[in-house]
Image (cartoon, coloured by chain):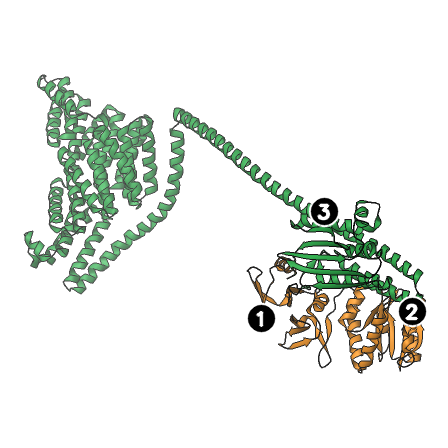
Chain colours: A orange, B green
Amino acid sequence: MIKALIIDDEQHCIDRLEKLLEPYTHNLIDVAGSAKTIESGIQSIAILQPNLIFLDVQLEDHTGFDLLRALPGIDFDIIFTTAFEKFAIQAIKFSAIDYLLKPIDADELSIALLKLSGEKSKKNTADKIDLLLHNTAKNHELPKKIIVATVTGFEFLDIDSIIRCQSDINYTTIFLKDKQKLVVAKTLKEFEELLSEHSFFRVHNSHLINLAYIKSYNKGKGGSVKLSDGSEIEVSSRRKDDFIRKLSAL
Amino acid sequence: MKKFLRINRIYLFLVFVGICQISFSQQKELDSLLIELKQHPQEDTVRLNMLNDITFDYCMLDYNKAILTAEEAIQLALKLNNISKLATAYRYKGLGYANMRKDSAAMDMYNKALQLYEQMQNRNGIANAYHTIGMLYSSGADYYKALEYEQKALDISREMNNKIFVARILNSIGVNYLYLTNYSNALDCYLQTLQISEDIGDKVGKADALTNMGLVYNHMKKYNQALAFHQKSLALFKELDDKAGMANSLGNIGIVYDNLSQPEMAVENYEKGLALQKEIGNNSGIAAAYTNLGVTYLKLSKYESAYKNFKNAAELSRLIDDKNNLAEALHFLGELHLKAPPSVLLSLGENPGNRFSNAISYNEKSLQISRETGDLAQQGEAWHSISEIYKAENKYKNAFDAYLKYITFKDSIFTSDKQQQITRLEMQYDFDKKEAVINATHKSSQALAAAEIKQQKIIKNAVITGAGIFFLVAIFGFVLYSRKKDAIEKKKEAEFNSQVANTELKALRAQMNPHFIYNSLNSINDYIDKHEMGIATTYTTKFSRLMRMILENSEHKEIPLADDLKALELYIQLENMRMQHKFTYEIIVDKNIDQENTLVPPLILQPFVENSIWHGISKKQGEGKIRIHISKEGSMINCVVEDNGIGMRESSINKLNNKTDKKSLGMKITKARIDIINRLKKSNATVTLSDLQEGTKIEVKLPEALAF
């Protein structure tokens, strides 16, 4: 059984989640309690020692991240619940932690719980939280690292170390500065969404490149760019204008 | 340096000719005078005057006859005790001697004349005598003595305000300064001369000054300028029919050409000059021309011609006691003996075996004469030759001794050359300044007025031209400016239009949201009314997911087809749930369309699907069917929504045209959006509604847009 704690500043949300968890309570989840503030949340965690926390991102004037920062250590899983905090969602995606959007969809909840039961290592969770907290430390700064799931587990990547990403249908190959290659079961589109606020640009249907690694640009219909690892990437003619605009804005 | 000496010698001749030209008369005049003389044998003042005049004319044409006539005049003057005319006669006789280069005899005559003038207190005469004696000293290379006499002459002339004479004296002073290598002073003199000559319309004086300036430029190695000055003076002499002057100028021009390394031109001019000198019997000029020709021929290795000319020069110079020229001719004869091939020497009647001793002896003679005249440069040249000759003879000790002497002379010349160089620079500056000042003041009154008129004209023209250019530039600039402005405005307008269009689009997209929300809330409400609460909750959750999707999509102008279809399908599912699965649906996308890469405006089909469900299927009895088919037709994406509802005849058309009907708002907005997209993209997207046998068909054709 998973001992779960729900932390949310709105009672109806707690109620709803409890209701949605009802089908699982007999064999998987034990909802041990709930809290509505950071302080009570910290207390509850200390007392209850939960295995899983459903954590609301927005807790009155604070955030769920603030709560996590206040804890001495993290040895539990987390599923964030949030309504529409775009920044928070992005940060959570970066750290590959699960989240549920409110109002919570029963189907999505079941998928999240399924994933949770499949995962064993708490160590990973702690690392992911570390990264998340790091990335959300200063709201103005963009995250520095990203977590990607690989065949063997998780990989923490410096965003700066990614030279480019190449799509292979539903997989994406990430080319790193140290010549390493990672194959990730995510679409290029997902990476584009994650990284386009950094200096990444999708120059082609199957190529997302880090603009910081461009060595030269050869003019042409769309042209092509040479990156510092020696690779030459075609630029789609439809992306050329935007690409040049983005380049000159650097 | 040797050229320099020759130049000055020729120049001195020019000055003497100048004296004659004070009352220049021509052969014609002489002829008529001679006839008159014959008709007037009485020994009286009239005849004395005639004799003097004839002497003067002969001084130009025949020196021997000049001397004879002068002697006759002297005798007559003494007889008549006419001191004034006696002085004139002495003077003219002196002039004749001077022209014959018999300097000492000339000096005697002038001293006699000077005494008489002083006796008479004839200041003009005194000045004239001083001046001539000065020139004779100059000819004898005693330049300081010469300057002393010239200065006396100048002072008197200035007191008397005799401009012509002042000019002439200044000219002579300039020559002396030239000898003393004081070029600044020399040029100063020449410029003053030029100014005075022009003021008083003295063309001869002007021509002399021009010649002298040419000589200075020649010495400054500015040969082209030198040539220009000499040619100007030659033209003036021609105008005056002054053969002596012409001959002199031709000689000078020859020298400049020689310096310009154009020996053919040099020879041509020398020969012309020589012919003229012979015509007027100017021995000094002839001798100088011979030397100059010899030097040029020697350079061209035409030894026979050179030899002949040098020999002639030496012979004539000895005859007329022209030491400078003699020393030079001898020196060159020595050189020729050293350089000419034995066969040539033989053919010239010289024994090649004695070539060295002959060469030495010529140079030693030259050296001796140069010592007498104090010509350092010529002595240096002689020593150089001697050194070369000893070297050729392998007499190295002698060669070395001679060389040391040459170096000594060379050094002394070099020092003065160095000084000259410095002076030259200063002088050039002074010269330019002086020239400008003199020119400015001299061309006073009408010249100034003319200049002013010219200047005003120039200013006027400049103003007109300037104004013209200004206007042209202004017009051109204005045209460019307005064109650019037009372009900018057009661009701005286009940008503005596109901005307006985009804003409209955004507004329309934004309108889609509340429209959709109200409709959906309506649906939920309806659902809650009809069904149980638990399922209503699920419904709401799904709805919120759709809402999120739609809000996100509507932020963008275009989204991938896949995203839009995902939202559309979710919407259809929700509606189907609400209707208790009253209808079935299928969404078909042709294989040749890349859903991720094909862009469509968000929510473009939703209103039509909504219309099918609400107005087609909901009112129909039995199972409904919605078919969405996306295909590609050329460069257009064809989106078809078909239903088997009740059709438009009964519902949609009427409602479409009825603006109060809220339910067709989505379709109206969509039509407006497509219009704007067409305007922006200059595309031809269309929406067509048509009735099927059963149901309605809506076709939306969009231009294919790819993300990559």
Q: Is residue B211 above or below residue B630?
A: above
Q: CA distance from mark 3 to mark 1?
A: 42 Å
Q: Nearer the viewer, residue B662 or B269?
A: B662
Quadrant hosting residue B21: top left
- Marks 2, 1 in one chain: yes
Q: Quadrant of the C terminus of chain B?
A: bottom right
Quadrant hosting residue A23: bottom right
Residue A16's label in the rendered image is 2
The tag earlier along the polypeptide, 2 or 1, is 2
Secondary structure of the residue carrying numbered label 2: helix
Tell me if mark 1 has few (under 14), some (14-19) or many (20+) residues whose alpha carbon lies within 10 angstroms of its own.
few
Q: Give the x, y percent position of residue B291.
A: 16, 45
Q: Which residue is mark 3?
A: B500
Q: Give the x, y percent position of residue B270.
A: 18, 41
Q: Residue at x 32, y 36 (%)?
A: B189
Instruction: Indicate the amino acid at tag 1.
Output: Ser
Secondary structure of the residue carrying numbered label 3: helix
Q: Nearer the viewer, residue B669 or B104?
A: B669
Residue B51's label in the rendered image is none
Q: Give the chain of mark 3.
A: B
Q: Which residue is mark 1?
A: A231
Q: Give the chain of mark 1.
A: A
Secondary structure of the residue carrying numbered label 1: loop
Q: Nearer the viewer, mark 2 or mark 1?
A: 2
Q: Give the chain of mark 2.
A: A
**Residues at badges 2 and 3 in contact (C-beta under 8 Å)?**
no
Q: Is residue A36 left or right of residue B74?
A: right
Q: Give the x, y percent position of residue B219.
A: 29, 45
**Residues at badges 2 and 1 in contact (C-beta under 8 Å)?**
no
